[in-house]
Image: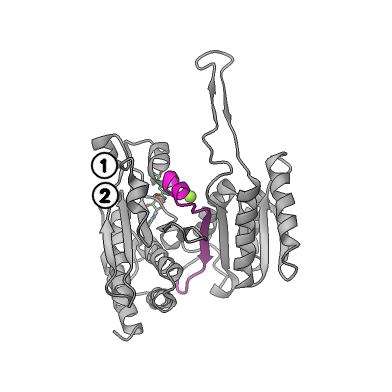
């Protein structure tokens, strides 16, 4: 059996609790993984002045994958936690795809109550290394009446082509439909460029049906007609916003996983829940671990462990469908550990353990 070496960065708040449950579930289906925990967090920042050591990326480079909880805590500005850990790791490891599956899971109550699991199964492919999240810009004439700030976006040919091509490749494994998020009426340089790359790549995939929608209309489409959507590809900012919206209209942030993928596999990919560290419920033991458990299943799938990943997915669906063990965000009274343990036990049964 292959032995995998996986790094965990539980981070802050509920990131710590949900990561412990995800590790437990993975151990139940695939024993023998060598886990190494890194305590990089806002707590570490307050102690040392850095979210992670300067050689953080080098220390992680040799691992097969990374499982990240969430970083961010009151007292440390969010741009510090984001630019001190998350964004440098995504860029150091060329994790240029942010993959965000959005499904209505069985037994969960959606904001779209009359929809079923068959109506809502979307894969959001978010560009993860450039776009609107750029360091280029600055504040000019600070404190003076003529003060202004510039924040530039960066859309490279390579960056647009590879993320759009990735979306088309994934669509071929699904329903063969790709919708591109644009806003070419407002962002008159970057988005027409993005659209032109999309049209050029689309011509290479004549078997895939395409649409281009302005991101605001697409937000409405996710709520009104989710069944018309299969794969959505969007820039860094648009993909981020659409995936929180999509998570919220399904069962909420507690159920939405995400992967920062390096498709070339020359560096580790990193998996995490879409949600953050949730300071409002941190330390209460009631965070929903499902998003992080499904992120761990995506991690196993990326490693080629499809059977183990499928067992976790099925265990999550079955436990949610039965409905007796739920965390408060799903209307129940169970703790993080109770739900994690129920899923781990079911996953063990499914793998014949
Ligand atoms: P959040 O996702 O942490 O919380 C939003 C709301 O959803 C809260 O009411 C929270 O209680 C609830 N929620 C989130 N996950 C849940 C779960 N598993 N179970 C039950 N309820 C859950 O977003 P927020 O409040 O905007 O950010 C809090 C901190 O997290 C900030 O410092 C932010 O920068 C950071 N953050 C970090 C991310 C990361 O590490 N990738 C991503 C998003 C936010
Ligand atoms: Mg987000």
Marks 1 and 2: CB-CB under 8 Å? yes
Q: Name the outermost residue toward the left.
A: 47
For disc 1, the neighbor class at 10 Å (few under 14, some 14 to 19, many from 20) is some
Q: Residue at x 27, y 59 (%)?
A: 36
Q: Is residue 185 left or right of residue 21?
A: right
Q: Secondary structure at mark 1?
A: helix
Does 29 sit above or below residue 151?
below
Q: Position of residue 278 (x, y in %)?
A: 36, 50
The N terminus, quarter of image: bottom left
Residue 222 on image: x %, y %:
61, 59
The residue located at (51%, 17%) in the rendering is 142
**Residue 85, quarter of picture:** top left
Count of labels in the image: 2
Colour convention of the picture: one colour
Residue 87 point in image, percent of width and height: 45, 45
Which mark's residue is nearer the viewer, 1 or 2? 2
| Residue located beneath label 1 in the image | 43
- Give the residues drawn in magenta, as a range: 87-108
Using a 10 Å C-alpha cutoff, classify the residue at mark 2 as few (fewer than 14 neighbours), some (14 to 19) or many (20 or more): some
Q: Is residue 292 left or right of residue 242?
A: left
Question: Which element carries disc 2, helix, strand or loop?
Answer: loop
Q: Quadrant of the C terminus?
A: bottom left
Residue 204: % across, % down: 73, 64
| Residue at mark 1 to residue at mark 2: CA–CA distance | 9 Å
Does label 2 point to a residue whose CB lies under 8 Å from ligand 1?
Answer: no
| One can see residue 333 in this view | no
140 within the magenta span? no
Q: Which residue is mark 2?
A: 39
- Residue 101 lies in the magenta-colored region: yes
Residue 205 in view in this figure: yes
């Amino acid at each position: 059996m292959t032995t995998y070496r996986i790094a965990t960065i539980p981070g802050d708040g509920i990131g710590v609790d949900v990561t412990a449950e995800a590790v437990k579930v993975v151990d139940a289906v695939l024993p023998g993984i060598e886990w190494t925990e890194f305590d990089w967090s806002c707590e570490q920042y307050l102690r040392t002045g850095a979210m992670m050591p300067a050689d953080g990326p080098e220390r992680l480079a040799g691992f097969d994958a990374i499982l990240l909880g969430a970083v961010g805590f009151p007292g440390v500005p969010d741009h510090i936690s984001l630019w001190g850990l998350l964004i440098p790791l995504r860029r150091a490891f060329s994790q240029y795809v942010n993959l965000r599956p959005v499904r209505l899971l069985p037994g969960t109550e959606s904001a779209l109550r009359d929809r079923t699991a068959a109506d809502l199964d979307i894969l959001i492919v978010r560009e993860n290394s450039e776009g609107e999240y750029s360091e280029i810009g600055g504040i000019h004439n600070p404190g003076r009446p003529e003060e202004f700030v510039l924040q530039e976006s960066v859309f490279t040919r390579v960056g647009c082509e590879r993320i759009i091509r990735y979306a088309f490749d994934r669509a071929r494994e699904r329903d063969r439909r790709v919708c591109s998020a644009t806003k070419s009426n407002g962002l008159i340089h970057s988005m027409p460029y993005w659209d032109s790359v999309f049209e050029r790549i689309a011509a290479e995939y004549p078997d895939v049906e395409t649409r281009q929608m302005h991101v605001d209309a697409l937000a409405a489409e996710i709520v009104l007609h989710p069944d018309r959507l299969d794969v959505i590809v969007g820039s860094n900012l648009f993909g981020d916003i659409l995936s929180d919206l999509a998570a919220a209209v399904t069962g909420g942030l507690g159920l939405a996983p995400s992967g920062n993928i390096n498709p070339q596999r020359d560096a580790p990919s990193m998996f995490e829940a879409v949600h953050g560290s949730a300071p409002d419920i941190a330390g209460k033991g009631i965070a929903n671990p499902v998003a992080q458990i499904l992120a761990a299943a995506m991690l196993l799938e990326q490693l080629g462990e499809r059977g183990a990943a499928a067992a976790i997915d099925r265990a999550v669906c079955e436990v949610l469908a039965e409905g007796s063990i739920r965390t408060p965000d799903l209307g129940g009274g169970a703790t993080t550990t109770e739900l994690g343990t129920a899923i781990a036990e079911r996953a063990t049964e499914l793998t014949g353990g």
